[in-house]
């Protein structure tokens, strides 16, 4: 069994998912891949299940009824991966905004000593291609805001491209992670750092999707803005053990 599993949450990704799956299994490393699909009306799950005949040993799917948010999809996937003892557990979007070739760099950062590695858009300037300026500014200043409120030294706290060593996910009490949208990404990084784990940022170039649409909404944005303050207040009353 390989030591690495990639978790990809999907909601209406029929234009991207087949190419993404084939690309991952073409990489020069043996990865397993778990898709967490929330009942995509566009039939993303059907495409995945057809490809499971091509990759019966490497490709897996969890199908959930209805859209339940990015955060709960990852928590489900993390527990699935921990139960099967993968050493390196990845998060990645389905839409090619994260370059699958960079998976190898994230894994290497963990082999070289990181407990978790972030595919970071902002650790060396601003490396985002084809997002409207309004979205770049919102995303960039969200990370500045998170750093200011929480004090964690992370340039890209909303990044959705990550590699966690299993021990991190086993330690951080996944059932206590509360946020479901992009605030989930912030909460995961904050909790990782608070447990004393070493988080390393690996520079990547993020390229906006060319197919399908983003699931970002104003509710998700609001959760991130107010959630960060709530998270900081909660942490004042919560004791974190050393990682
Ligand atoms: N299962 C499931 N998947 C979901 C859901 N919502 C979104 N997804 C999936 O989660 C991935 C990311 O969603 P997008 O909608 O493509 O995200 P984005 O707007 O491009 O957001 C990017 O920027 C965020 C903020 O910086 C990042 O947090 C995020 O990871 C991503 O890189 C995609 O594979 C999408 O299908 C959901 O409710 N359920």
Image (cartoon, helix red, strand yellow):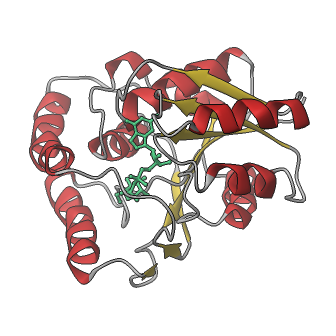
**Above or below, 103 relative to 35:** below
User: Which quarter of the image is occupied by the N terminus?
Assistant: top right
**Does residue 55 appear in this view?**
no
Residue for point 21% across, 56% down: 146
**Does residue 137 appear in this view?**
yes
Q: Position of residue 9 (x, y in %)?
A: 52, 38
Residue for point 78% across, 58% down: 23
Task: List the single residue furthest toward the front.
Answer: 42
Q: Is residue 196 left or right of residue 140?
A: right
**How many numbered marks have been drawn onto this rendered protein structure?**
0
Q: Is residue 183 left or right of residue 131?
A: left
The quarter of the picture where residue 57 lies is top right
Q: Position of residue 163 (x, y in %)?
A: 61, 47
Q: Is residue 81 left or right of residue 37?
A: right
Q: Nearer the viewer, residue 76 or 46?
A: 46
Residue for point 64% across, 49% down: 17
Q: Nearer the viewer, residue 211 or 100?
A: 211
Residue for point 72% across, 57% down: 19
**Above or below, 159 relative to 14:** below
Q: Position of residue 155 (x, y in %)?
A: 36, 67
Q: Position of residue 44 (x, y in %)?
A: 58, 39
Q: Is residue 69 left or right of residue 151?
A: right
């Amino acid at each position: 069994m390989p030591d690495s599993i990639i978790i990809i949450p999907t909601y209406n990704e029929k234009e991207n998912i087949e190419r993404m799956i084939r690309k991952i299994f073409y990489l020069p490393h043996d990865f397993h891949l778990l898709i967490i699909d929330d009942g995509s009306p566009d039939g993303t799950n059907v495409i995945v299940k057809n490809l499971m005949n091509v990759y019966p040993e490497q490709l897996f799917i969890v199908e959930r009824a209805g859209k339940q948010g990015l955060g709960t999809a990852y928590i489900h996937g993390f527990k699935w991966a921990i139960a099967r003892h993968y050493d390196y557990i990845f998060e990645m979007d389905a839409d090619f905004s994260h370059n699958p070739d960079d998976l190898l760099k994230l894994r290497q950062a963990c082999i070289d000593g990181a407990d978790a590695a972030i595919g970071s858009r902002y650790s060396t300037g601003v490396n985002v291609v084809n997002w409207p300026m309004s979205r770049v500014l919102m995303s960039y200043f969200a990370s500045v805001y998170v750093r200011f409120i929480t004090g964690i030294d992370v340039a890209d706290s909303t990044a959705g491209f990550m590699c966690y060593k299993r021990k991190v996910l086993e330690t951080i009490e996944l059932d206590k992670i509360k946020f479901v949208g992009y605030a989930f990404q912030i909460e995961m990084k904050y909790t990782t750092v608070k447990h004393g784990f070493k988080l390393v940022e690996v520079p990547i170039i993020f390229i906006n999707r060319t197919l399908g649409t983003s699931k970002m909404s104003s509710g998700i944005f609001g959760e991130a803005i107010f959630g960060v303050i709530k998270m900081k207040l909660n942490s004042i009353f919560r004791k974190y053990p050393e990682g």
